[in-house]
Image (cartoon, helix red, strand yellow):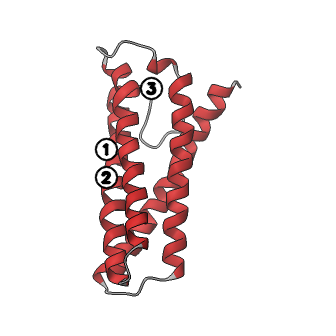
Amino acid sequence: MNLYGILKSAHSGWRYIVLILLVVALLQALAGWLGKKSYTEGNRKLNVFTLISAHIQFLFGLVLYFLSPFTKGPTSEALYRYWKMEHIAIMLIAVVLITIGNSKSKKIADGVAKHKTIAIFFGIALILIIASIAMMVKNDPSRTFFGVS
């Protein structure tokens, strides 16, 4: 297997780590916000692990962006446009939202407000990630939503 294949498999598989951490962090943040719970060290660690996993995933994707044959085709075709422009833009926005949410929460003293900030930013990021994966399945018939490619 070549470098491209290894990175593609790593990127494809790592998404599950990101998604699981993001869903768990979002659920904890919603429970903390709506249940008016204090913000714990465990919450902070989960949010940081979520942030780190998203950044690692983005780095895998960034390297793949420059190696992939799918970013070399014409943007007039949906498949190439998706990989060349749409996927990376949406994922960049999602990672930025996760980063901003984590950063803003660190500056807030009130635990419930920290949970609210995480819930909003991580929630929007999760929606964008799921939408991008759904767009991938629509634009690239060789891919499946839960498949590892």
**Location of residue 2 (image quadrant):** top right
User: What residue is shown with label 3?
Assistant: 142
State the SS at label 3: loop
User: Which circle marks residue 131 in the picture?
Assistant: 1
Give the residue at mark 2.
127
- The amino acid marked with disc number 3 is Ser
Percent from the top left, x then y, of residue 110? 35, 84
Distance from disc 2 to disc 3, alpha carbons, whole Å, reads 23 Å
- Dot 2 amino acid type: Ile
Considering depth in this image, is 15 or 144 the residue closer to the camera? 15
Image vertical order of residue 3 relative to residue 38, above or below = above
The type of residue carrying mark 1 is Ala
One can see residue 140 in this view: no
Residue farthest to the right, as pictured:
1
- Give the percent coordinates (x, y) of residue 15: 51, 47
Identify the mark at residue 28; answer none if there is no mark. none
